[in-house]
Image (tube, rainbow, N blue to C red):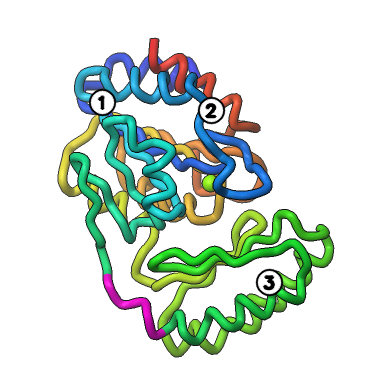
Amino acid sequence: MFSTLTEKYKTAVNKLILLDYDGTLVDFVPTPERAKPSAHLLNTLRTISNQPQTEVIIISGRLYFDIDRFLGVLPLNIIAEHGAMVKENGKWKKQIVDYRLWKQSVLPIFNRFALTCPNSFVEEKEYSLTWHYRNAQLESGHEHSRELIRALKDSARSYNLRIIDGNKIVEVMNNDIDKGKAVKKMLKQNEYDYVLSIGDDQTDEDMFCALSDYSNTYTIKVGEGETFAKYRVKSVSEVLNLLEQLSK
Ligand SMILES: [Mg+2]
């Protein structure tokens, strides 16, 4: 599978590589702030983005300053917070504004769940709220996540919010931002004859789905579960192998 992807890559003229971060370029760790990139990963990304006519974009759900702290040293454009914040040519720009109202209604619900489910915690981003339960006891975390999703339904309806039932997270955000919309915007600005997109989570499915309308796109899902992606790899290390091959 990699050989087709790398061969096409070598002959393409204008290339775009869209990479999710957590669970795709780095393995999951107990707290999001510990998922630092290795020097090797930074080097690989730098080498690829320095190749002619090759644009590498990191597309993540993380807080913009958080992902910037990890990858800001690289001359890459970054799409953060699922598309709510975009870094182009070194400058961060907000893509949307309306978020204060719904947060007032949703935050107390999240905090209640963080209290009742031990070792779970809430992360507040400018445009979204995330409840993380990866450190909670497996069954309790799962049960609480089902309850939380039910508890959020009313607010979601009143404020037009999107509830993401992700990998050991429940996240709420405005309905008009997602990775798919962010990617479609990119594809309108430029013409590419090779688009590679890699991700592991439910939010990456929007990206895979958006790309399925275009030719010369190669979408890769990391790990198990249903997907719109054309290809699948088992782990982060397989992703890193592929990137290394592209960097040669
Ligand atoms: Mg991910």
The magenta stretch spans which residues? Answer: 97-101
Residue highlighted by disc 2: 239
Q: Residue 161 location, x and y as percent?
A: 44, 77
The amino acid type of the residue labelled 3 equals: Ala
Tell me: is circle 1 under 8 Å from ligand 1: no
Q: What element carries label 3?
A: helix
Residue at position x 34%, y 18% in the image: 47
Label of residue 97 in the image: none
Amino acid beneath label 1: Thr
Quadrant of the rendered image containing residue 75: top left
Name the residue carrying label 1: 54
Q: Position of residue 18 (x, y in %)?
A: 37, 38
Q: How crowded is mark 2: few (under 14 residues within 10 Å), some or many (20 or more)?
A: many
Question: Within 10 angstroms of label 1, few (less than 14), some, or many (20 or more) residues?
Answer: some
The numbered dot on residue 114 is 3
For residue 137, what is the image quadrant?
Answer: bottom right
Residue at image coords 78%, 67%:
118
**Which residue is rendered at x = 54% and y = 43% of the image?**
22
Secondary structure beneath disc 1? strand
CA separation, marks 3 and 2?
33 Å
The mark closer to the camera, 3 or 2, is 3
Q: Which kind of residue does numbered mark 2 sit on?
A: Val
Magenta stretch, overall SS: loop
Disc 3: residue Cβ within 8 A of ligand 1's nearest atom: no
